[in-house]
Amino acid sequence: MIKTQANCSDGNESDLIHFELAKKMILDHISAIQDQQQIPIEKAKGRCLAKAIISPINVPAHTNSAVDGYALHSSDLPIENETSTLTVQATVLAGQFLSTECLPKHCIRIMTGAPMPNSLDTVIMQEHCQREAETIHIDARHKAGQNVRIAGEDISQGATILAAGKKLTPPDIGLLASLGLPEIKVKRKLRIAIASTGDEIYSLAQTPPLGGLYDSNRYSLLAALDRPDIEIINLGIIRDQENDLLNSFNSAANYADIIISTGGVSVGEADFTKAALQSSGEINFWKVAIKPGRPIAFGKIKQSTFFGLPGNPVAVLLTFYQFVLPAIDKMLGIIDQPIAPIIKARSLEALRKKPGRTEFPRGIVRLTKNGEWQVKTAGKQGSGILSSMSMANAFIILEHDRSTVKKGEWVDVQLFSGLF
Ligand code: AMP
Ligand code: MG
């Protein structure tokens, strides 16, 4: 009998690391950057807030009317089954302030947003009263205090309105503007260097010869990292030469917080990344019990965190989303929760699986008319088949200990919306 070696399709080697453990070990090594920068709020969407925002004012600043109508003393509201007639004493528009007192049995014509005149506490919507010359008639359907927005009811002065670490959204930006804050402090952008490796990999400006192929990984990563809080350093394609790899990574490590390379981390003949890094940084090479994307490298080159992702295009994206993205968010100090929602869906087909590794088939999820989420796999599942990843809208997550999924069983799916 011939002697063979364990390979990625076995999934039962003793040195495989559990997916959750690999993720935890990575996150345990990541600490948040502290550098901050002051930027105008117009540029702040998608940036990570560095310091909590304490409201300097009440919002709204003045108690005001929520509708167009008539402001009055609630003591002038009629009792049940009766009506009242009030004299219109004056008008106040938004942006004006009326300092005269409203007399008993009188009311003030008021517009939406106008400050409530002194001592008045109730507004009747204009559609709910009958106007006759300089008087209005109202019935008993109204309640004291209605249609009034109280000063500070949205935000009170001194309240913490946004927590440090929040990734700023359009409503957050509006909120900052409503507090009169033109600039805020955010975490500086995270600097991420990316490189493709391989003698067979060609840039889009070249025509690959026989045996060569276009570099897709760098473009997937460029797109995945195209975020307002990230600055990309594009290292291009690095040949399978130990010195080229070392020089490139070492110089990137002087500036980048994270270096991501793809390819060259398996046991193939040309896997120089391993050799190059073993001499320069503290890098661990892991066989993670996942499919696709088993071999990854993780560690440090100088002060930079290094991720050596597999070469196969689907494995790159999978390992990026499962390992690198949570690390990026931790490094930025982002506190917002789920990176992508995980929901339960019914599998429309049987999925073959052996216990002992976490598998991530790419799936197409849809919601049926009856409100049930269903999922089927998106075409061929090989780790080099990018077209099926492009067709998919979710990762199906088949947990480590799970065996074959029967048709109709429930599975976890991680929706791409939120990741992409
Ligand atoms: P490696 O891990 O370097 O052996 O690469 C595994 C597979 O992924 C090989 O078939 C490579 O040709 C392919 N590959 C590596 N890098 C890239 C890239 N940048 N773009 C597309 N395919 C790649
Ligand atoms: Mg290679």
Image (cartoon, rainbow, N blue to C red):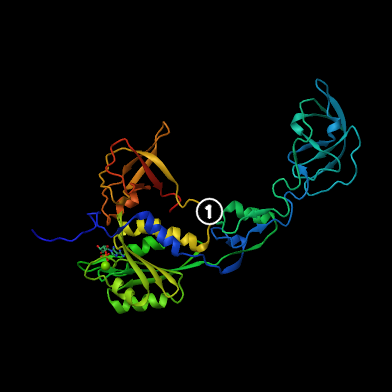
Picture coordinates of residue 69 (x, y %)? 78, 36
Picture coordinates of residue 324 (x, y %)? 41, 61
In which quarter of the view is residue 192 placed? Answer: bottom left
In which quarter of the view is residue 349 placed? Answer: top left
Residue lying at the far left in this picture: please name it: 1
Q: Residues within 10 Å of mark 1 (few under 14, many from 20)?
A: few
| Res. 225 visible in picture | no
Q: Is residue 226 left or right of residue 48?
A: left
| Res. 263 visible in picture | yes
Location of residue 190 with respect to 70 vertically, above or below: below
Q: Which residue is drawn at 28% across and 55% down?
A: 383
Q: Pointer 1: what residue?
A: 336
- Residue type at mark 1 is Asp
Q: Residue at x 80, y 40 (%)?
A: 110
Q: Ligand 2 shows up in which quadrant of the image? A: bottom left
Count of residue discs? 1
Picture coordinates of residue 85 (x, y %)? 86, 27
- The quadrant in which the C terminus is found is bottom left
Location of residue 55 with respect to 102 vertically, above or below: below
